[in-house]
Image: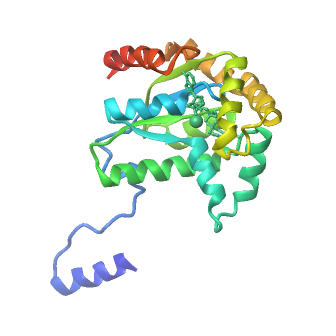
Amino acid sequence: MRSRYCRQLQRALGFRFPLPTRRPLLFGPHRLMKPLVVFVLGGPGAGKGTQCTRIVEKYGYTHLSAGELLRDERRNPDSQYGELIEKCIREGKIVPVEITISLLKREMDQAMTANVQKNKFLIDGFPRNQDNLQGWNKTMDGKADVSFVLFFDCNNEICTERCLERGKSSGRTDDNRESLEKRIQTYLESTKPIIDLYEEMGKVRKIDASKSVDEVFDAVVKIFDKEG
Ligand code: UP5
Ligand code: MG
């Protein structure tokens, strides 16, 4: 419609001008500023969200928690995926990548539309399995660079205790012992192998996440001061 109008205008004016194109944002005006991504991984309750908040304050990244985006989508009454997302979250299963990627991509596009300079992203809790990784590679290959993987390493007992404690007030439907057992199982079976894969590529920056929030952040700072 728009291009038909432009062609009519070209004829009326008697000269040609470039027609507007409709490219997705990550290919469009921001193509010179490729998104730089740090994947933030670790077990449930390892402290990913807590540390990301601090990284944002100190280093100006945009924090995208895949889990938060899915929980928001679940709350959206117009979403066709609400039930599926809720079932996966409660069961500690991983939501199909098409849903997660579309949410992540939308947020990245919005952030870069608002400020083209803001191209540094912390993607928290993703990719969690092979399906996630393949979906990311298929959709984002060449359009975003993964700088490194920040891995918060914390044992299952501490992770469980933290989530149960948080569950007293979080309202999260997966902060209970039954869901936590499944979340940990999924983490060990599906997510840890993805971390191992990045480790083989020399891309993992591992942190002992069982220490206090401040001690963990001290280790985070050392990494970000070095990596940028
Ligand atoms: N806390 C944090 N750090 C501490 C420290 N050093 N010492 C003492 N206490 C500490 O922290 C958890 C709790 O511990 C908080 O109370 C905090 O104060 C305290 P938090 O920073 O929230 O940890 P985090 O690692 O973010 O834990 P979270 O529960 O968010 O991790 P999950 O990976 O389980 O949850 P997420 O939200 O990423 O995913 C939830 C579900 O969504 C998944 O199980 C899955 O079903 C689904 N999902 C997908 O399907 N696909 C995705 O890509 C992402 C999620
Ligand atoms: Mg979290």
Figure colour scheme: rainbow
Percent from the top left, x then y, of residue 135? 61, 40
Pick the residue in front: 5 or 99.
99
Q: Residue at x 60, y 24 (%)?
A: 46
Left-right relation of 131 to 147:
right
Q: Residue at x 48, y 53 (%)?
A: 106
Residue at the far right: name it. Answer: 178
Percent from the top left, x then y, of residue 91? 80, 41
Percent from the top left, x then y, of residue 70? 62, 49
Left-right relation of 188 to 125:
right
Q: Quadrant of residue 179?
A: top right
Percent from the top left, x then y, of residue 24? 42, 56
Pick the residue in front: 187 or 25.
187
Quadrant including the C terminus: top left
In this rendering, does residue 22 appear at all?
yes
Left-right relation of 182 to 134:
right
Pick the residue in front: 58 or 134.
58
Pick the residue in front: 46 or 186.
46
Quadrant including the N terminus: bottom left
Name above or below for residue 93 compared with residue 185: below
Q: Residue at x 71, y 51 (%)?
A: 85
In this rendering, does residue 129 appear at all?
no
The image quadrant in which ligand 1 is located: top right
